[in-house]
Amino acid sequence: MSTGEGVRETWSTRIGFILAAVGSAVGLGNIWRFPFQVGQEGGAAFMVMYLAFVVLIGFPAMMVEFVVGRKTGLNTVGAIREFAGGAWKYLGGLFVFIGFVILSYYSVVGGWVLRYIGGSVTGGYTGTAAEGAPPVAAQYFGTISSGLDTLLFHGLFMVIVIAIVAMGVQRGIELGVKVMVPAIIAIFAALAVYAFTLGGATEAYSYYLSPDLGYLLDNWQSIVPAAAGQGFFTLSLGMGVMITYASYLSEDENLGVDGATIVGFNTGISILTGLIVFPILFTAGVDPETSGAGAIFISVAQALGSIPFGEIVGVLFFATVAIAALSSAISLIEVVVSYVIDEFGLDRVPATAGIGTLIFLLGAPVTYDTVMVDLYDIFAAQVLLVLGGILLVILVAWLHADEAIDELKKGVGNLAWIGDLWLWMVRVPVLVVLLVSLYLGVDGFVEFLQGDFAEFLSSL
Ligand code: PFF
C-alpha cells in the first residue's frame, strides 16, 4: 500500500516488528552517544544509573507508547487525538517536531560516519602527525565535521533514508532491518572478541564496569539527566516512534515480551559497544573523559591507527555504525511520514521526499560547527524527549488507565497484579524521576547555552 486511502500496512511478521523496533533503538545513540556520555559522566558510575534507567524507567515507558500505538492503529498525531482528544492533540504535534529536530542533526552525524567508511579504506585518519600538530585523527575530524562537504554528506545520508522509507513498511523498513540488525549484532560481537585480546582490555573493563559509588553520589545532578536523556534517546522513546511502530501491530501480540526483547537487545548492543570502544581507547592511551561528541571519531579513529588490523577493524566498525544509524533514522522519519500519509492522504513517495528535504534544511546549520551538534543534541535528548515522555505518561497512566490496562491484556490473557504494578510504577516513580530529570536537564541546557554556546557565538 502506498497511499493514504487504502488499507493501512502492518508488519508482515512479529519478528519484523521486533527487528524494526530494535533497528530503531540501536543506532548512533548506542555507538556514538553512549561512549561519550559514559566518558563525560564518570565511567561505570554512569553505567549504573543508565542501566537502572533503562530497566526501571525506559521499559515501563515503552509499554506506555506501545499501548497507545496498538490501541489506535494510527500515526502519532492521530493516535494521541483518538486516545485523548482536546488540547492533548498538540502532544502529537510536539512528537512530530521532535522527530524533525532529532533527525536533522542525527543525519549530520550519519554523514560523518559515511565519510569515515571512506577514511578507513584510504587510511585518511591514521598516520603520524607533524611535530607539534594535533593527532591525524583529530585533524581529519576537524576537516570532515563541518563545512560544505559535511552538508553534502548530510544530504547523502538523507537521500538513503528517503529511498528506504519511500518503499514502504514491508518492502522498505521491514526488509531493511531484517538484514541490518543481524549484521550489526554479528559484527559487533566479533569486534568485542577482538577488543578482548588487546593490551588495554583489563584496565578498560575496570573503568567501565566497576562503579565508584562515591562519584555517583557526588555527581548525581549531572549523571541523572544524562542517564535519562540517554535512556530515552537510545530506546527511541519520548517522540512516538514506538507509538508509530506499534500501530502496525496486531492484537494477539504480547507487548510485554516484545518490549523486554527490544530493551534487552538494545542494552546488549550498548554494553557491547563499550566493550569494543574502551579497550581500544585504553590500549592506545586515549583518555575517554576528554573525547566529547568527537569520541568515536577522534579517539577511536586515532586508536585504530595504532592497533593490530586497525584498518580492517575501522571499515567494519564504521560500516556497522552507518547501518545502525540508517535503521534508526528510518524510524525517525517514519513518525512524520506516517502522520502526513494518514492525515493528508499523501502518497508515500512524495511525502517522504518532501519531509526529508525539510529535515535536510533544518540540519544544514548543524554542519557549520560541531557545537551545533551539542546544541541540538542536548536540547533534544535532555529536554524534548523527557518532556514528551512525561506528558505521555500523565495522559496514559493517570487519565486513561483503564483503556491502557485493557490494551496491555490483549495477547497476554490475564495480567493479574503485573498490570497494577506497571501502572503504579509509571504513575509515581517513573513520573517523579522524569520530572526531576527534566528539571536538571533544562538546567544543564541553560548552562550549556551560557557557557560553550555563548563562547561559540562570541567567536563568530
Ligand atoms: N534510538 C536511536 C539511537 O539510539 O540512535 C535514536 C533515536 C531514534 C532517538 C528514534 C529517538 C527516536 F525517536
Image (cartoon, rainbow, N blue to C red):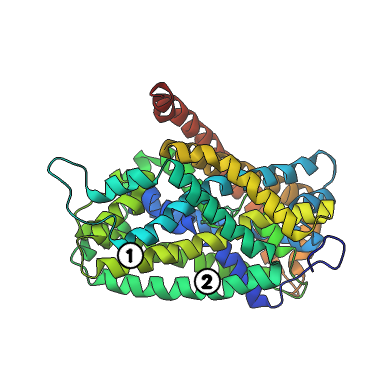
Ligand 1 quadrant in view:
bottom right
Residue 314 in picture, x, y percent from top left: 32, 64
Q: Looking at the image, which residue sits at the far right? A: 5
Q: In which quarter of the image is the C terminus?
A: top left
Write down the quadrant of residue 217 in the picture.
Answer: top left
Identify the residue at image location x=71%, y=64%.
Answer: 246
Residue count near mark 2 (Cα–Cα under 10 Å), binned few <14, some 14–19, many ≥20: many
Q: Is residue 427 above or below residue 16?
A: above
Dot 1, how many residues are within 10 Å of its Cα: few (below 14), some (14-19), or many (20+)?
few
In the rendering, at what x and y percent does residue 124 appear? 29, 56
The residue pinned by badge 2 equals: 180
Relative image position of residue 18 (x, y in whole percent):
62, 71
* Residue depth check, mark 2 versus mark 1: number of the one nearer the observer: 1
Q: Earlier in the sequence, mark 2 or mark 1?
A: 1
Check disc 2 and report its element: helix, strand or loop: helix
> Is any atom of residue 183 visible in this view?
yes
In the picture, which quadrant includes the N terminus? bottom right
Mark number for residue 121?
A: 1
When the figure is inspected, residue 337 is found, relative to residue 16, above or below; the finding is: above
- Between 383 and 327, the one lying in front of the other is 327
Q: Hey, what amino acid is under mark 1?
A: Val
**Residue type indicated by callout 2:** Met
Mark 1: C-beta under 8 Å from nearest atom of ligand 1: no
Q: Name the residue at the top extreme.
A: 458
